[in-house]
Structure formats: C-alpha cells, structure tokens
Image (cartoon, rainbow, N blue to C red):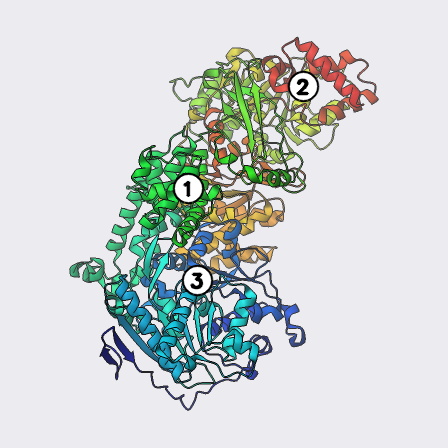
Amino acid sequence: MLPMDTTRQDYEEYLEVVIPPSKPIPPRSTERLIPVSELDPIARGSFPVRRSICGKTDVAMMSILRVLDQHRSKNDDANIHATIDRDSFKIIYVQASEIVRKFSKRLQWLSIQVRELTGMSTQIIVTTPEKWDVVTRKPTGEGELASLLKLLIIDEVHLLNEERGAVIETIVARTLRQVESSLSATLPNYIDVADFLRVSRYKGLFYFDSSFRPVPLEQHFLGIKGKPGSPQSRKNLDHVTFQKVSDLVAQGHQVMVFVHSRKDTVKTAVSIKEMAILEGNVDDFNCQSRNKEMKQLFDCGFGIHHAGMLRSDRNMMERMFDARAIKVLCCTATLAWGVNLPAHAVIIKGTQVYDSSKGAFVDLSVLDVLQVFGRAGRPGLETSGEGYICTTEDRLTHYLEAVTSQNPIESQFRHGIIDALNAEVSLGTVANAHDAVQWLGYTYLFVRMRKNPYGYGILRESASDDPNLGNKRNELVTLAAKQLAEARMMIYDQETGAFTITDLGRIAAKYYIRHESIEIFNKQFRPKMSEADVLAMLSMSTEFNQIQVRDAEEKELLFLEDIVPCEVKGRTENSAEKGIETSQQKVNILLQGYISRQPVEDFALVSDMAYVAQNGGRIIRALLEIAISRKWATVTAGKLIHMNEHHGKAVVDCGQAISDGQTLYNLRPLGSDIAMELHILQLSHLLFRQTTETLNVDFVISIPDGQPPPSVTIRFVSDRWMGAEDEVNVSLETLTMPVASNSHTPILSIPFLAPTVLRNPAVESIFANRLNNFNAIQSQVFWTLLNTQSHTLLCAPTGSGKTTMLVALVWCTILRHPDASVLIVVPSKGSLADIASQIRIGSSIASVSVETAKDENFLLPSKKRRRVLLASASLLLQALSHRDPSTPLAGLDLVVCEDLERLDATYELSISLLLHATQTCPTRFVCASNSLNDPGDLAAWLNIDPFALHSFRPRDRGQSLTTHTQTFSIPQSAALFKAMAKPTHAAIIRAGSEDINKGTLVFVPSRAQCRVTARDLITQCALEMETEAGYLPAGISQEFLDQYRMQLRDASLIDFILKGIGFFHEGIRKDDRRLMMRLYTEGVLRVLIVPRESCWSVPVRAGVVVVLGTQYFHAEDGLKDYDVTELVHMQGRAVRHLGNGEFYLFCQGEAKDTLMRFLNEGLPLESRLLESDQLAVWYTEQTNRGRLQSKQDMVDVLSFTFLAQRISTNPAYYDCSSDSRDGKLSRIVDGLTNQN
C-alpha cells in the first residue's frame, strides 16, 4: 500500500509514480532541538556549530564520542585529546561506503586515527561486512581487534534482504556472542531486526520514518517503457532524464544526475547539453555569475564528478556546485557516499549497475538509492527536495516497495549457512551440534523463521509444536555438517554430534573459500601438477562463477591468449576459430594477463580482471597451504617467473634490498628409525625480524624401515619475496644410523601378586590401605627387584606403579640389613618433595632416618646405622666433586635413580661419577624411567644384565587413558589461548557430566598465563552456562566457601575460587597452595591451572588433563618447544588407578605427528653432556684442584658416562666419525683443554 495522495501518470515514454513528501510531525511539548553548544566539550569540537545534526552518521558519531569519553583518564576539558587512552579500545564502522575522510576530519582535533581495516595504531576502523567477517574468523593478528572492540556500528542492515545479508547475519551472530554491539539502520520490520540484534524494544530501538527528514522529500518513480537494454529503452531514458532536468532547471533549481560509470558522467552531460540546444532552452542552464573566467569555464552550467578525476578537479567541481556556479552535476554514486553536497533534486539515471563480483549487470541496491535520495534538499536553505529514479518498467514495482518499505526484510542466511558454520567451527566457537543450534538462535534467520515459518518451509504443525524451532535448527545444522564432512572440511561424529575442524576447513575459513570450491579442489588437486594444471584448477573455483563470456570481449581475450605463457586448458591450436567458450578459460587468461601486466581496454574486462586478480591471490594462497597440509612438496620452475623481462633491471635493483637466507644443517639420528632434521615432506613457519641473524630449527622425521634415502633436500623459501630462498642437498650415504634395539619387554599373562609376597609384615603394612594387588607390570618385575641383587632398569609408562615398587625395594633393603644405607637420586630439587612424601610413609615402621640432603657433605660417613638419603642431581654432583676420586665410596647398599628420561648434563655427570666411585663396592643400582624408544644403551651404561632390563611401551599401561589432539594454525600469542579456551571448557564440562568427581588439570606455558586462562574459562562459563557458580559443583553454599575465604592470604584468588578454579605454582604462598590443594582433592575446585615448570611438583592427578600449547617464551632463547619429557609427565597426571583418564593435547599442526610418535612409542634418549657448559665447568674445577693430573684421567672419567656408550652406537648425533671410542673421547678432552 502506497502513501496517501500518491499519483500515477502513464505517458508515452514512461510511467511515473509520485509520492508526496511526508508531513513533518511537530515536536511534543516535552521535546526540543538540542543546540550543539549544549553538548559536552568532547562533542562540541566534533560537530560544526553552523550545521544541524540530522543523519544516521551523526548518531554514529555521537556513539563514538561516548566511547571516547568512557576511555578518558581524567576530566581535563582544556586538553581533551591528551586524556584519551587510545590503546584500550577499538571502534568498528561496518559500511560499504567510504567515510574515512569524513570521520578523520571531524576527529582530527582529538588525535583519533580513522582508517580502513589496517594497523593496530588505529582507533576507528572502517570496513565492509566481508572484511570484518574475515577478521573475526581469525583469533590472531588482526583478529585480536575483536578483543579490544567496544563499539560496533553496522550501517547496512538493509543488506539483510540481499545476497550479502548472510554475511551481516554471520558477523552479528558471532559478535553478539563476544562483545556488546551498537547498530543503526532504517527498516520496515524494524522490530524483527531489533530482536535479532538483541536490542530492547523500549530502550535501544529508535525508528524514524520519512516525516523526521529535515527537508521533506517528494519521490518520483519513473518506469521507462521499452524492452530493457534495447536501443528504444535507452533513447527513452535519455529523453526522460533531459525532460526532468529541464523542468527542474527552468524552475531555478540545481540538479544532480547520478549515473553508474565514469564514462556516463561525460556522456550524460553532453547528451543533456545537445538536447537543450535542440530544444532551444540552453539559456535555462546558464549561471548568472559576474566571474567571467568561471562563466567561460562552465558556459553551459554543466559539471561532472567521479572518482577517476584528480582530487583538485573534484574539489573544484564541488565548490562550484556549492556556489551555484553550475546547475547540473553529472556524477557517480561515490559523490553521494563520500561528500556532503546536497542539491534540490537528484535523478538516478538507470538502475543497472555492473557488478564485477558477479560479472554481470545487477539492480542498483536499495541502500544506494536511499543514500542518493538523502542528497535531495538543502537543510537550512530550502523547504523541500525531489528525488527521481529512472528504471525499467518491469523493475518499477520493486523499487517502489523497497524504498517505501512495503516488504519485510527476509533472511538470506540459508545460502551461506554451510560456510558460516565452517568458520565458527574453525574459530572454536561451535564445537558440536548443540553449540551450532544455539548459534543459529543468534541469527536473523531464526527470528524470521519464527515470524514467517511458512516462508521458510516449516509446516504449521511443526511451528506450533516447536515454537523455538529446535528441530528445524537441528535439521539445518545437521545438513550443513554432513556437507562439510563430505567435503573433508570437518569431522562430524553423528553419535555424539561433535565437530572437529580439519586442515581443509581451517584453510577455507582463513581464506574465505567456499565449500563448493573445496569440493572441486578435492577432485582436481594432485601431488604433481604443472602451472597450467594449477591455473586451470584455480579457474574452476566457484568464486568465479559469476564471470561471463561476452561477444564484445572475445577479440581482446584471444589476443591475451596468444601472449600468456601457460596453455589454457581445453584450448587447442584450432580453438581461436571457436572463440573463448567457458568462463573458466576467460578467468585463466585474465589471471595470466594480470600477472604479466598486459593492458586491457574494455571497461567490463578491466573490472573482471581486477576481480580475478583480487580473488586469485587469495585462492592460490589457500592452495599453497592445502598442498603444505597434505605434505606435497613438488616444485616446478615455470614460465610465470620470466614474464617481465623488460622490467628486469628494476627488479634486480629491488632484489638487492631483500634479505636472503642460507641453510646450514646438522644430522642427528635419534634412533634406528628417527632422524632429527628437515625432511622434504615436513616444514616449519619461521618469523624473521629485522634483527634476526640465525634461527635454529629442529625437525624429527621418520626413516621408513630404518633405511635412510640417499639424500634429502632442505629448502628455505620466503612466502613473501620471490628469490629469497636457499636450497641444499643433504647426502645421507655416509650417515650411520644406530642399530635397531629389541630391548622391549612383552607383557606376560601372569596372575597379579598380592602385597603378601613381600614376606615382610612391616613393609606389607605400608601398602595395606593403598592397594589390594600389584598390577601387571609390578607383578612382572617383582622378582628381579625384590629377590635379586642385580642392577635393574625399569622403563614403564607414567602411572604404572614404578615409584611404588621402588618404595617397597627401599624398605625391604633397609629392613634386611641392620646397617643398610640407601641413596635416592632425582633429577631436580622440585622432584624431591614428591618422592620424599612417599618414602616417609614407611619411616614409622623402623627407627630409620629419611634425610633430604642439604649440602655437599651428606655422603660423609654417619653414626646412624640405617638411613635413607634423598638428593638432587646437582647436589650429588657437588658432593662427588668435593671428595677424592681415588677413594672408593663405601657404605651405600642401594642407589635408586628416578626419572632417567630427564637425563641432562648434570644428572648424567653425577651418575657417572657415582658409578666411578662405587665400581669396587657392592653397591646395587636400580633405575627407573618413563618408556624409552631404545633403552639398550642406557642399560649397558648402568651395567645391567639383559634379564634385569624391563622396558615396557606406553601402550602397556594397565589403566585406561584416552589421548585427544587438536591442532591450531595460530602463532604463539594471546589469541591462541583464547581459541583454546572453548575446547578446554568443553572438556571440563564433558568430564563433569560423566563423573562429578572428575577434576581437570590445565597446563599453561607460564605463571602469567594462569590467570588469563582462568578468566577466559570463566567467560566461557558465562556464555554457555546459566549458573553464576562457574565450575563449582552443585550444592556448594556461600557459607561453606566463606570459611575458606577467610583463610586465604592472597585476596585476589577469591574470585577464581568462587568460580571453582585454583592455581598451583611456586609464586603462590605455601598456605594458599595447601588450601587450594585441599579444596581440589575435596572436589570443591574442579579446575586446577598449572604452569609448565610446575608439572614436576604438582602433587595431584586428574581425570582430565589439558595441555594448552607446547611452546613457551624463554628469556634468552625466545620461543621454545616443550621438552617431550614434560609432555609425557603431564600425560601421566591423567592416569588414575580407579578410573578412566583423558589427555587433551592442543598444539601446532606441524608438531602433532612428532609428539604423538613419542607419546605412543616411547622417548628418545641421548647424552646432553656436550650441549651445555656443565662438563667444561667441572673439568676446570677438578683441574684447578689437582684431581685430574693428566688427559688420561679425564678420559677415564668420560668412559663412565652415557656419552661414551652412546657415541659408539650413534656417532652421527655427536658429529663423530666411526673410529674408536677412546679416540672420540680423547678429542672431547682436547676440546675441553683448549677452552681453558
């Protein structure tokens, strides 16, 4: 229904509908216009006092100023710009138009930077919906903008009804789940849109119809007769435009005629001028000006304006029109968007606009029509304005309904739901079907399905039985998930509903690639392809489906085809006669033409080439990452790099300024089937800074069947600069790989032994309340440990009961011998507390002293008959270094060495000296380690007989442990941990739903990250859980927690404890640590966050262990990888004797295979004696004390080291040739001597 008093006139050339201006509504008695002078100081400076504030852009500006005022450090009206904290906020203005210059000018006095989407020093960022969608898909780099976002302004909600509307829904649904939003638009069904935007209908919703316009607007809709696109239709359009312009100019008004190409501005101005001359009314267009030069320049009163003109010329046109020196200005829509230059009347000539993204002419958007109509009428100077739109007769009704808001805005999200779901799964905000159903509840599609179910295919019965449309949403999600799973973009578990993103899905989200294109790549992409094949596949992308082949372009395309270097697939020598047949061929030619910088003349072809180039670079980058993900390393030296030979000199000159790379390598075998080096099928992303000189990169690659290939190629390639690369061929023909060991022990099918087999009631009493039976591994090693005096090595997975058996051995040894003395050695001081607490459980069964060594004198003879000594490797080294090495170390009956997988230089040297000092004494060595890949050399070093070597693989663990992995492509940053928060929260909730007593340990890289991760987890709770209790179990009252709150010495921990989260590290007071351990063991705290360095000292286990990343920043070495032994120990914290354990490993994609190999197959172990200065320091000290008299003395000491054993079996790791062991040790001593 059209407004009252609307008229419709049918003429010979056109049909005209005239909508009269709305009658202004007088303000209420309680309302008045607020002068700019009454605004606060920060707003007054941003609004010129001489003009009124009447547009949506001005409302947006006031919202921006409010955010600025909220981020002022103090109220200093005399120096406002200096009080704004510019680093604490970001404002995003989503609009397709260019408003940067307008906002920059008005906020310049506050030193606020307004830019297009670029730079972290910018406070206000203007972007398009598509760009903001791309940015918010990335939780890193530019994606970190979202974490600072305080205000989001969307000035394009009209687009909901168009194809781009799916993007608007995507970014709003995503943003509403992260930050608060402020949006503006003018819509017919504005209540629906308000509900979609979560706007209060009573507070945040403002609807202004046309009666609020400062200048009433009379709207004319003209339907030009004739077949659209025909010569008659174009002739009628030109004549009707001239007629309306003539009538307006004759009345003394200025007119702006909007056309849709730069050529048409001149063409239209000339056409109107020629018609005026023919009609004899050209004098009506003359300007009455006394300026002769101006009159000569604009002798007929016409001007043109478009973005292709020089800025100075555009400014002059704007000034002349504003000064009424010209009456008719022919321009493009950029004038309406970018410049506030009103006129009495505006005329839109034609509504067919060429869209390069679709390769075709499309209807002018309603948003552009409204923006142009907004330029009609001059506030403060005139009381009315007129807007004309000249369209074809068949589109007249469309624009009438759209501009007058007759039809409700409908959702277009169904067309983009698959790619939108993939983006959310990639981002981590949607982890399963339940999350996806909730996510759909944030979309405009959900709002409109509830209001108009029949329009979206929902039956009447379904809508009444399920008012929240849960089944319909689940149906849409399931269909989208299945399609993504078929495209291999994600893994969809239909039983649990879980979504797991794949590399393909992550790459598609990152580079904005449609799922249809991924399906094409799945079929066409092969490991070996020529450049022509890659270009052909690239041209098949659905992103180019809109590109059309036109007859007018054929001649120029054929010319380009002859020039481009690569063959166009499907074309033969005789194809020129047929012309260009498909859009894929056209895309291929345009892409090659762009790369080779070939000029193009046809206007539409120029737009198509720009579109192909813009999207081609993005897609080819995605193809590169897909190839890397699939570990395809084929590289072809093709013709594309030789295209611009005439620019060669300039390129060479620029190339001299680009840093080059040189690759140096070192081969280090870690086992019979592992080598520590770069493989052609592996890669690492390196970041070079301006100060970077050297980067050390370690890779672990598998050697099939233990037989290395003749050579491998290491290639360094910059992905930003052509020519910045290096390649080196590494020969493996002389590489000596260690011999494969068959030292692993199979699990035997034997009965589990009871503690009574200890045959010592006192020792049995230690375990009476702890276990009913020994497990399979404990039962199998029992005889060797407890009934022989042989040196023994036990390698078993974490949680298999190694320490329990060692405790039993210690007390059996003590009680069997009246003067027994036992030494327990651990790799670090942090491990002493754990072993000491377990050993001291049995100290009450006999008058036995359990002592923790405090100085280097603990090895001196003692008056105590029985004693158990505990010492760290560093203290043992000090003690052994201060005694005479020629004197045997008597009195030690048993030496227990714990955690030999952590064998570093200090630990190795201390054990070596102990072996040397006890070589003539009947001292027994019993050592324990986590599962090792090859324990044979370790056993040989410790003089262990084969029957006493018990080596079990990780899979031999008796307890149930499930390992989950999730990879991320985000560099180490705050954004990485934000991305990991969602799956961590999901793991915690899943554990709690299965077993309410199942606690969770979360390992993070540093102490500083503990509280950051805790806040992220609390945020996830707030987003997804209705309760405010966080992770606290149900039934925990406030009164119960109050008694613990009073005991906390650090008040900053209270808020986290109230949410069920605790911390454990050395930076927390002991009393507070004990309290949190107590709350955790009692089940009050369900989440315990622990930094990496505290993994060895945390005294509890958990049903769920989550490792957030496997890298950390070292003060001197920068970014470093976790030691694999740390990860194995963290995994072991999930092993529980009475329940299932789950281990979640979140890591970088390139690290997953290596880490999982070590977790599943056992750890590699090599000597680190030459990797630190510990040996050199010890050698210098002993030489200065005169205890090393000759070179042979040092060689003798080295002969007791693990290095001496391993250097014979794996010489390549230590850069040694295959000569005698003594010769190698002699050269090491020579090197130590030269250092002194």
Inspect this view and state whether residue 998 appears.
no
Q: Are the two marked residues, 1 and 2, in contact with CB atoms closer than 8 angstroms?
A: no
Instruction: State the residue position of label 2.
Output: 912
- Tag count: 3
**Which mark is drawn over residue 262?**
3
Q: In the image as oriented, which residue stretches furthest toward the top?
A: 1220
378 or 489: nearer the viewer: 378
* Residues at marks 1 and 3, CA–CA distance in whole angstroms: 25 Å
476 sits left or right of 977 in the view: left
> In what quadrant of the picture does the N terminus appear?
bottom left
Q: For the residue marked with disc 2, what is the amino acid? A: Ser
Can you tell which mark lies on residue 244? Answer: none
Q: Is residue 244 above or below residue 1191?
A: below
Mark 3 nearby-residue class (10 Å; few <14, some 14–19, many ≥20): some
Q: CA gap, disc 1 to disc 2?
A: 75 Å
Residue at (34% x, 53% y) in the render: 358
The foreground one among 381 and 683 is 381
Q: Mark 1 — residue? A: 560
Comes first in the chain, label 1 or label 2: 1
* Location of residue 868 in the rendering, given as x and y in whole percent from the top left corner: 64, 26
Q: Position of residue 1228 (x, y in %)?
A: 72, 17
Q: Secondary structure at mark 3?
A: helix
